[in-house]
Image (spheres, helix red, strand yellow):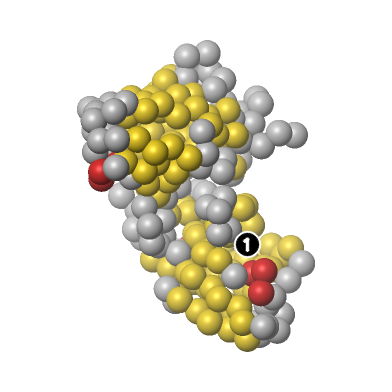
Amino acid sequence: DTGVSQDPRHKITKRGQNVTFRCDPISEHNRLYWYRQTLGQGPEFLTYFQNEAQLEKSRLLSDRFSAERPKGSFSTLEIQRTEQGDSAMYLCASSSGKGRLEQYFGPGTRLTVT
Amino acid sequence: GIQVEQSPPDLILQEGANSTLRCNFSDSVNNLQWFHQNPWGQLINLFYIPSGTKQNGRLSATTVATERYSLLYISSSQTTDSGVYFCAVGGKSTFGDGTTLTVKP
């Protein structure tokens, strides 16, 4: 059973540039979640999908952030016009969505905005 | 939203010691997980425990849902247990700020 994978693992970008991250969930998991984690804090919920439908977005997700899961499989998170405050670890998780709500996390993408 | 508080924030132990980590939450939940975050940032699932008691080797966890708390027990700690332990509750996983455990040889 392949776990959750994320790509890239690290991204360094200049302020103002756009970046896109990819998440591949555990196969047959129909729920997919994005979180952001900054140093010294726990992960914070950003958004989640059930299949291809984006069901909830946190107020942390500004207009510069957009997430998609076009075919209900992998998902992308795009940040437009990056700011230094976007520097963080971006984590993806998936769950089966069938009664048991246990989430499994990927290794994360660490974003540094210079 | 749900508030999650973890205690203590930091814990330093000698190898072989036992420890108890606590997670308090502000509302009834149908999902509670404990994670260990390794130095590379990966969150490792320890327990899915919305209620009751579970054990896995040297680790065990108890959730008393009616009193809104969960406990993680680590016995005979090893240096490899070092890291940050998170409690996460609710369907969209609200995390506490974690307990940083350091086990000294």
Q: Quadrant of residue A85?
A: top left
In the displayed structure, A108 sits above or below B82; it is above
Q: Quadrant of the N terminus of chain A?
A: top right
Q: Is residue A90 visible?
A: no
The picture places residue A17, in percent across and down from the top left corner, at 29, 28
Judge by depth and name the residue closer to the eye, B65 or A100.
Answer: A100
Q: Tell which of A81 and B64 is nearer to you.
A: A81
Provide the residue designation for mark 1. Answer: B52
Counting from the top left corner in percent of width and height, residue B9 is at 42, 73
Residue occupying image coordinates x 45% and y 24%: A76
Q: Is residue A99 left or right of residue B56?
A: left
Quarter of the figure with residue A25: top right
**Vertical side of A33 occupied by B15: above or below:** below
Residue drawn at x 64%, y 69% is B81
Rendered residue at 71%/33% (across/down): A2
Spot occupied by residue A87 in the image (x, y as percentages of width and height): 33, 45
A28 in relation to B14, above or below = above
**Residue placed at 49% from the left, 59% from the top?**
B87
Between A102 and B29, the residue placed more toward the observer is A102
Query: Please, what is the three-letter code of the amino acid marked with disc 1?
Result: Gly
Front one among A12 and A9: A12
Outermost residue, top direction?
Answer: A71
Decide: few, some or many residues near mark 1? Use Cα within 10 Å; few <14, some 14-19, many ≥20: few
> Quick check: A5 left or right of B4?
right
Q: Secondary structure at mark 1?
A: strand
**Chain that bears disc 1:** B
> Is B60 displayed left or right of A36 in the figure?
right
Would you say residue A88 is visible in this rendering?
yes
- Which quarter of the image is occupied by the C terminus of chain A? top left
